[in-house]
Amino acid sequence: MDGMTPVLSPNGGADRIARPSLHDLIVDRLRDMIIEGELAPGTRLHEVQLGERLGISRTPLREAIKYLASDGLVDLVPGRGASVKRLSRKDVRDMLAVIQRLEELGGELACVNASDEGIARVRVMHDEMLSCYRSKNRLEYYKLNQAIHSAMMELADNETLRAMHGRLQMRLKRIRFIGHEGPERWAAAVAEHEEMMAALEARDSPRLSAILGLHLANAWTRVEEYV
Amino acid sequence: MDGMTPVLSPNGGADRIARPSLHDLIVDRLRDMIIEGELAPGTRLHEVQLGERLGISRTPLREAIKYLASDGLVDLVPGRGASVKRLSRKDVRDMLAVIQRLEELGGELACVNASDEGIARVRVMHDEMLSCYRSKNRLEYYKLNQAIHSAMMELADNETLRAMHGRLQMRLKRIRFIGHEGPERWAAAVAEHEEMMAALEARDSPRLSAILGLHLANAWTRVEEYV
DNA sequence: ATTCTGTCTTCTGTATACAAAATTCTGTAT
DNA sequence: ATACAGAATTTTGTATACAGAAGACAGAAT
């Protein structure tokens, strides 16, 4: 994951060296705390207490919380502060349904817009992921898996798509990681990735779209029982 | 548009009287100012000056800006404050490509999940819109048009889909309104809406999905020259 | 015993003040 | 005249202080 908060200004300011602002640091930190479950769903975000814990004052913390609220990671109740959003089973299913369509679109666009170098980069990640699979390194496998999906969406060259996909993927991060699928399901997922890679390299748009859709549809059955 | 910031707590708190917080007021106000062009793309958001203009202090204003930044309406450059996001031609095209897929998905889900009452409500709006078309009331037509699309997404009963669609529709609001299409294009759009309505009432999922997709694809040709 | 009410505490909402960074302006040197 | 350097000003970033709700608790009344 590249992190949602851009470190370099998107485009306008050439290649500005952006020393991460405290704001970005806090946003990323809070996001991690939520995603990794350090802040459990439903937890109230006490401004003073949390501020002390992070060693910052309330003002930037509040701003970061507002940012995350717009991201959908926390609920903002007017007089009562913020709390970590709870995800129901249905929420997860709904998110997967949307991300599925986004990836299908991304796959189609990637076949058209990707550069050969871009595809090659994904191939490298894919091969690394395979070696993690063979050595049963779940954590690295998982990270590369996410990175591959993100990279594919990047190849689509559609900023809106990339942003929305990234946001959803982030929110699903915690859920997906829980899904400790058995060996046969894992093997199936890997096979799907093989097919994805082949379709991308062949720039076979319908095939890539289809396999991405299938992959995401299967994702639900993989995590279903753990939600 | 129903406004992205919920005035009533989503569900949990029964019918809570939610006196809109200053935060929400500012967010909505700024959003309107941006959408209606009062704050032109590229405009720097001077905190002091803007705060005086709105009669508020910097703190809640900054929080609101952070919120909108996460929404993608403003760019946040670390040491240099915020500015209204510029939309390039490509940005608009990309956004339309994404919203197209979202509406296709929404259409499919709506055919399955919608209640008969829900469909009836859309029918009412549709008929109202037709009468606006006949009386050439562009503004009302446009508003109802948006409301219909939003309502359809609501019928899909997928919160993530609704939120993402709403966000994109909001960002496209200004662009779309500019598109003063000629009579023949307008007629075509109305015909598409007729078909959409028929497909929805027949709960013909593939047909609704297809016509929604076509409608959005045409939307680009309608606004293309004005971006 | 229970419920209502009033007070007290705690937390959020907002404003202001101070510090640091960035931009602009000005003066000087080439 | 132009370019560079340095100071002054403006603007953002952060902290703190105060005000106003919301929630908790205790006491009184039924």
Image (cartoon, coloured by chain):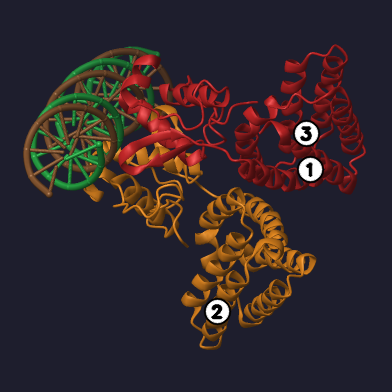
Chain colours: A red, B orange, C green, D brown
Q: Chain of mark 2?
A: B
Secondary structure of the residue carrying tag 2 is helix
What residue is shown at x 58% (from left), y 69% (from top)?
A: B118
Q: Dot 2, how many residues are within 10 Å of its Cα: few (below 14), some (14-19), or many (20+)? A: few
Q: Nearer the viewer, mark 2 or mark 3?
A: 3
Q: Picture coordinates of residue A203 (x, y %)?
A: 89, 41
* Residue picked out by circle 1: A217
Answer left or right for D22 relative to A38.
left
Secondary structure of the residue carrying tag 1 is helix
In the rendered structure, which amino acid carries the disc numbered 1?
Answer: Ala
Q: Picture coordinates of residue B97 (x, y %)?
A: 69, 54
In the rendered structure, which amino acid carries the disc numbered 2?
Answer: Val
Q: In the figure, B143 relative to B16: above or below?
A: below
Tell me whether marks 2 and 3 sit on the same chain.
Answer: no
Q: Dot 3, how many residues are within 10 Å of its Cα: few (below 14), some (14-19), or many (20+)? A: some
Q: Dot 1, how many residues are within 10 Å of its Cα: few (below 14), some (14-19), or many (20+)? A: some
* Residue picked out by circle 3: A222
Answer left or right for B116 relative to A58.
right
Tell me whether marks 3 and 1 sit on the same chain.
Answer: yes
Mark pair 3, 1: CA separation: 9 Å
Residues C13 and B221: in front is: C13
Mark pair 1, 2: CA separation: 35 Å
Q: In the figure, B176 relative to A49: above or below?
A: below
Q: Are marks 3 and 1 in contact (CB under 8 Å)?
A: no
Q: Picture coordinates of residue A101 (x, y %)?
A: 73, 48
**Numbered circle sitting on residue B124:** 2
Residues C8 and B220: in front is: C8
